[in-house]
Amino acid sequence: MKIHTTQNLSSQTVSQPTNITLPREIRYTKYSDDMHSSEPDTSHDSVSFKGKKEIVDKAVKAGKKKFVERVADWNIWDKMFKSGSFSKLLEITNKQEVLINSGTALVICTLLRPATIMALPGDKNKKDCAYAAAHSVSSGVWGFIVPLIFIKPLAKAYNHVIDEAGKYLRESTIKKRWPHLNISSIKNPDGTIKPMKEWKDYKNNDFIRDIKDVKKVAKPKHISEVSDKTLQKFFTDIDLSKTKNISPNQWVRTDGKKASIDLQNVFIAVKDVDKGKVSYYPLKYVKEDILKEVYPNLDIASTKAVNGERLHFDKWHTKDGKPFEFDMNNIFISDWAESRLGIPLVTGETTKLASGEVKDVCYQKNNMDGELFTPGTPITGEMLDAASTNAVVDKFGGWLPDLIVSYPRATATIAILPFILKNVFGIEKSKKPEQKPPVNLSETERKAVS
Amino acid sequence: MNIQPLSVNNNYKNNFSNRTVSGNAPANSLSPSFKGKGEPGKVTKFFAKYYGKWIADSDKVRKFSEKLSKMDKGDVTRHFQVLGSVITSAAYMHSTLKNKDMDKDNALTLAVNQGLNFLIPTVAAYTIDIVIRNLIKQLEYKYSAIQETKISTLAKDTRKTAERQLSRQLKGFRTLAGILTFTMIYRFITPVVITPVANSIGRKINEHKAAKKAQSAEPKFKVQTEKKS
């Protein structure tokens, strides 16, 4: 495996080269240029793993993204996203998407479309415009009433089945649906089904039925970029006056001792040179393979306690037994007060899907206990495949009744709406003028046609 | 795999003084809803037993869904919207072609028009969906970060509930984006922009047909005029 290692060799206090053997080319990565110019790693969102082939594509995307990022930065989104009503709307959408679909159509058909029809100049007369607007309103209302009466109860019933899966579904279906579930945890000793919130997964963590409920962290920021307040939060008793224009390796506490940070809060940023992809790994949980690659002179055995847990880097050794001097310039901090971007927590573990595609393993949010960076249950390829299938089955549950009534609803719209508009509201289309004979006929021909 | 840890060099030291006194994202309080779910009614239980269970427990539905999910890993809501639109358009076309009050040629033109009124918006909707995919992802990240910021300020016991709530909201976010795109195209852009264009094309086709019909009738007229003269 070819590795390009970048260390801050210009750091004034740490003689990093003593820790690192440099068998290959050393690359200097200027963080401020390199990180900010690179595209935020969107690949994490879909828990996907971008390979070598993605480089050109990503470069193209990076060009487009600037505009997208500018649009995403508009204040209107902040206002909307902070609103409780918007969050409520999203929850309803998740449960009743057919109803939300009809509701959206209702708003368009009763407000936006009639207003546009009446406002737009055209060759239609006023009566026809009024008829078109009235038809739009009535079709919107009709299109909303049908799902409200007939489809909402069915979608609600389907959701109830999933909520009470233990009661309604066969054990074989449950196993297929949630391959991470510890099936023996769903029953009480007397054979009765436990409530879903008491179920456990194969890691004995709390069972999460939404497989892709991925643990996200605030996009880490370099320690030199974070606010004083955040520094004080992560570095106990840090002397802030001695952090300005000074390398983090020289930061001290108010008592003059070297400033220290809990391993739990340290992230390192690793760039895949071939792919141009930057990943942030929590130092406490990053896989050994990654550590070996980025710190080739590190004695991996020295990083582990007897119980296998990773020790603080102050206790690490180089392969030749000398203390490993960790470059504090490598530290990135993840804190929601510092970043408006959430990224999934990854540790360098990968998984293979049934399609053969390799993806970064993300983790569920089920092992939190207040510790923000504790990975939960790893989301394996098998789980991802099951999640994709579940999503389609669930959509069927909601949409099937709507699809079934689509045809009769459309037929009824054609037959009933003009009748109602005419006989109840007295609105009808103006009658078409009698068809004139084609203009390019001679007088005699016109007479013949008529 | 070529990987490298990122650190800073001396040039970056200048950024050290750029740190602000407070972070850029203010923490907000969040009041997650803890409303308990009411006991489902008889209707819900009835449909759960005879409809919900039938779908969720069916091996055939699962196998079919598995095949579909391999074709598209994204949110499939938009495909269901398109399927609904196919059925609706088919209903309109069928009823047009069956209409006895309409001239056969006119009915056919109108049916083709109705078919195009499905086809063009569908292509447009899928195209727009692809174009704005990145924006939607960015906005989802933004929404997620705002909510996570709120959640991080919560007490440990309420955090779990809020996290579950966020998970449902994020699923809703992706679905809502698809619904808004496709519904906007089908229910607004189509009748306001595409239909008038399709109508005008249809009218021209009809006029062209009428002119052709008249031309084919031309010799007959000539014979009649000759006889008269």
Image (cartoon, coloured by chain):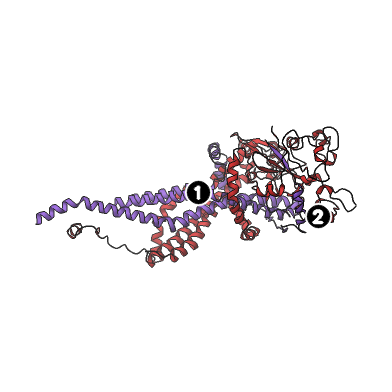
- Mark 2 Cα within 10 Å, few/some/many (few <14, many 20+)? some
Residue type for callout 2: Lys
In which quarter of the view is residue A5 placed?
Answer: top right
Give coordinates of residue A174: x percent, y percent.
63, 38
Q: Residue at x 72, y 42 (%)?
A: A28
Residue A138 vs B91, above or below: the answer is below
Q: Secondary structure at mark 1?
A: helix
Q: Please state which of residues B143 and B4 is positioned toward the viewer in this rendering.
A: B4
- Mark 1 Cα within 10 Å, few/some/many (few <14, many 20+)? few
Chain purple in the figure, letter? B
**What's the chain of the residue with tag 1?**
B
Residue B143 vs A172, above or below: the answer is below
**What's the chain of the residue with tag 2?**
A
Residue occupied by mark 2:
A244
Give coordinates of residue B5: x percent, y percent.
73, 41
A245 relative position to B51: left or right: right
Give coordinates of residue B62: x percent, y percent.
56, 38
Residue type for callout 1: Thr
